[in-house]
Amino acid sequence: MIDKLLLTLPLFIFANCGMSSQDNHQDTPAGLAQISGIQDIKEEFSTLTSLRDSSRLLSVAVPYKCYEESGTVTYYYQGTDLRIITHDYHAGGHYSANNQYYLHNDSLFFAILEEATWMFDSQGGQGATRDDISQHRYYFVNNEPVRCLRKKYSLYSYRDDNPAAENVPNEEVECDQVANVRSKYHTLIAYKDGTNRTRCIEE
């Protein structure tokens, strides 16, 4: 059940190098000239999401496996500009995550970090499970956080009234995890350039 919570990304595998890529449309709109507020962030996020979902960004995917963790880091380019990084991974069988980072002029302006854990739930009978989902959203202007949101909810295998993710309200939270978000982001930037490719991705 937990796998269904992660965004599905198309992978195009090179047989010889262990990476995947797609040479997509080049006539994509340039996007905003600059990002100065929350509304600009929402607009640029919507534009990039649409381009990605319609396969109008070039994508390069790097799958990996390290001990009990395995996943895929995917880099999306608009022309030669890196615009989105996604990191899907699983660890230990009961944990999975989908982290997304959005860039404008080589700077992080938006990040969504989602993680899910599952466990057996005796209240639902034999074999019943519960997934606990948490999602954090970080908004940046000029590299500084301007808004941070969080939502948490649970999904039960034996219930028909599970909430849809989009219907769970966000709550405003302190931006006290920004250093951790930046660290994760810079790790993936280094991984793109070939740094630490022989090591585990320590997000």
Image (cartoon, rainbow, N blue to C red):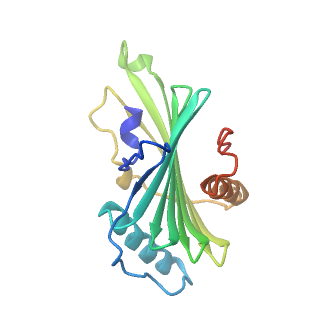
Q: Residue furthest front?
A: 16
The x, y position of residue 8, in whole percent, is 36, 47
Say above or below: 3 vs 135.
above
Residue 182 appears in the figure: yes
The x, y position of residue 161, in whole percent, is 29, 38
* Left or right of 14, for residue 63: right
Q: Residue furthest top?
A: 126
Residue in the image at 44% along x and 70% along y: 45
Residue in the image at 26% along x and 34% along y: 160
Say above or below: 124 vs 58.
above
Residue in the image at 65% along x and 45% along y: 197
The x, y position of residue 9, in whole percent, is 38, 50
The x, y position of residue 155, in whole percent, is 39, 35
Q: Nearer the viewer, residue 63 or 163?
A: 63
Q: Quadrant of residue 189?
A: bottom right
Say above or below: 162 vs 57.
above
Residue in the image at 34% along x and 44% along y: 163
Say above or below: 122 vs 89.
above
Task: Tell me the quadrant of the picture where the C terminus can be found.
Answer: top right
What is the count of numbered marks? 0
Q: Quadrant of residue 50?
A: bottom left
* Left or right of 178, for residue 130: left
Residue 88 appears in the figure: no
Q: Residue furthest left?
A: 160
Task: Tell me the quadrant of the picture where the N terminus can be found.
Answer: top left
